Image: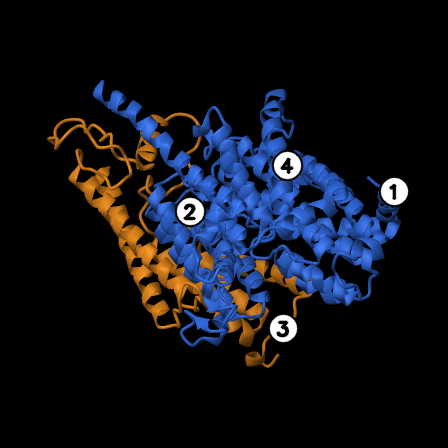
Chain colours: A orange, B blue
Amino acid sequence: MNDTRSRDDLLAGAIFVALGGAFAYTASTYDVGTLRAMGPGYFPLALGLVLAALGVVIMAIGLYRRRGSGAMAPAPASAPASGPRSVSGPQPVAPDRGTAEVDAEVDAQVDATGGTEPDTGADERGSVPWGRAALLLGAILFFGATIGGLGVAPALLVTILLAALAGHGTTWRTAAIISVGLTALCVVIFVLLLQLRLPIIGPWLGG
Amino acid sequence: MDWSNLLLGVQTALTPTNLLVCLIGVALGTAVGVLPGIGPTATIALLLPITFNFDPVASLIMLAGIYYGAQYGGSTTAILLNLPGETSAAVTAIDGYQMARQGRAGHALAAAALGSFFAGTVATVVLAVFAPPLAEAALKFGPAEYFSLVVLGLVASIALASGSVWKALAMIVLGLLLGMVGQDVQTGTPRFTFGQRELYGGLNFVSLAVGMFGVAEIIKNLEQRRNRPASVHEVTSLRLSKRDLRTISGPVLRGTGLGSLLGILPGGGHVLASFTSYSVEKRVSKTPRRFGRGAIEGVAAPESANNAAAQTSFIPLLTLGLPAHPVMALLVGAFIIQGITPGPNVINSEPVLFWGLIASMWVGNVMLVMLNLPLIGLWVKMLSIPYRILFPAIIAFSAIGCYSLGLNAYHVYAIAFFAALGYVLIKLGCEPAPLLLGFVLGPLLEENLRRAMTISRGDASVFVTRPISLTLLLLAVAALAVAVLPSIRRKRETVFQEETD
């Protein structure tokens, strides 16, 4: 359990370091200014650095998890009384980890009964549905790219078709039916009832 | 209090025309709040040109109705689908959706409706009684105070994160950074736009919310072949047990109070109100572990808070002419279309408008309770639609809705971007809610920081030398400590537990 958690931490931390660094770097190319007269780059630069720093912290936590018990976490806790511990048997939780990580672990262990767990992802090991996600995201991107040119109806037909195909066990036929039905519904709601100024058939198709 | 004014207001609100437009407004608002991807902002913007033909009172009653009606609707989808239709509903989704999964959707909806109604009633009275003096108090807030207030709000949101405090902090900062994409308000410099003109206006909040909370959830649901749990279909009863009513009475009162106060302060008061109210309830509760797993207080309190705040956020608009948030800014436009200059004079020069609007808010709340509780069956029927039809519909509505905000394809692309980012981060144990808050409050934070620094000529101590600002910052530190402390306390118990294994 610790391994997947630590992998999550390492990855998340790495992402934050990368994003923070990217933001900070880009921000530094803008006019940073001074504390008294902050330029557009000042705040983003500072925030980017903070994010990268937080990312490092999270990665460090991930590394300590991987090493198992006895590690000292960089938290503002009182000085630990114990020195290094041997990794054996049930892992005692190091008393000087001052984060809410422990909470999550305890909750997962203790609350096996009653109530529903909110999906924080780290507890669930479903595999990433690459294909389905690609269909969904592709559908959305398709819509954005073609709505202006194709118009609401054709764009929606394809978009919904693609999205519907991402469903488990949805056949082409079912997807097509869903597509036609939902397209009609959307046209009624958005164009007729809400009076959105969108052409039902767009310029590419001669609308 | 001036009873004659209130009477005038009630008379105005109860004319047949105004009753009708109020009904249209709240019904439309609920519907729009329920539909993901389109919110009150878009709807109000679309209807502004139409209100040109209405008289001022009627048009404002309707637009206002859309706004707080959407709060009700947004919380409905938050509870039933874990899709917050409105930012402030994001908090309701936390426990509300869990309650729905446990088959208690009806209770959650009823708690939300009753809490909102109570809060709406109280807030209307607050509006009527305290409008002038309250605006006076808010005038004392300078940029330093606003900065500290936003810091407090952001820190308070960490209390919501069930995962690591560090990850929550990182999400907040990431949200802040994402909020900076676009043209810098103060200098006009485009930031993080990489030459794309379409990004000058910044990343779209609706795209972010819909992507991270909606589409990411869909991807998550598609991980495994499974049907939605049958329990979600049964909304057994809307009647809250006496115990439930007693449980929510405290949270509703606290939420109403908190919301009424926070709504007045410009800058997304109702969002801050619901987030803060949730963390307050979690702190105050004797069983904080239940939060996040279907605690009814976690629904009642934020709902009361955000409804109270939604109504009291009219105060700066009606007394100072200051928009507290984007919807209010649109309403300023509505005033102007009608030839009325919003400002302190409105109370005196347009008493019919002022008091009529206030009275109509209470009427609107009554209508909403009547609409929502019986019609809950309708909303719940939505859930018995097979998921394979529902999720493409969500995708379609989101795409059209976001596109309709400015006819900008980039808003649609942004949905996909945030969905991917959101899914990855959620899988890695990072909560999206703090990111959302950071995104919304980021620009405000930066603007006030810069202003405070300009005014103090670079003297950073201004945040701690000004008393109000200092108090707020201390509260933020306290909130952070409190968020961290229980875990220190609790893991001592864990050590004992594991050692006796």
Question: Which label belongs to residue B7?
Answer: 1
Q: Are the two marked residues, 3 and 4, in contact with CB atoms closer than 8 angstroms?
A: no
Q: Nearer the viewer, residue B381 or B352?
A: B352
Q: Is residue B499 visible?
A: yes
> Horizontal placement of B499 versus B268: left or right?
left
Give percent across and percent down for residue A66: 18, 41
Whichever of callouts 4 and 2 sits on the residue coming sooner in the sequence is: 2
Give percent across and percent down for residue B17: 86, 53
Dot in front, 4 or 2 = 4
- Work out how far the residue at label 2 is from the one at label 1, CA to CA, in angstroms: 53 Å
Category of crowding for the residue at label 4, using alpha-carbon neighbours closer than 10 angstroms: few (below 14), some (14–19), many (at least 20) = many
Question: Which label belongs to residue B256?
Answer: 4
Type of residue at label 2?
Asn
Q: List the residue tagged with mark 2.
A: B221
- Work out how far the residue at label 2 is from the one at label 3, CA to CA, in angstroms: 33 Å
In the rendered image, residues at marks 2 and 1 fall on the same chain: yes
Q: Secondary structure at mark 4?
A: helix
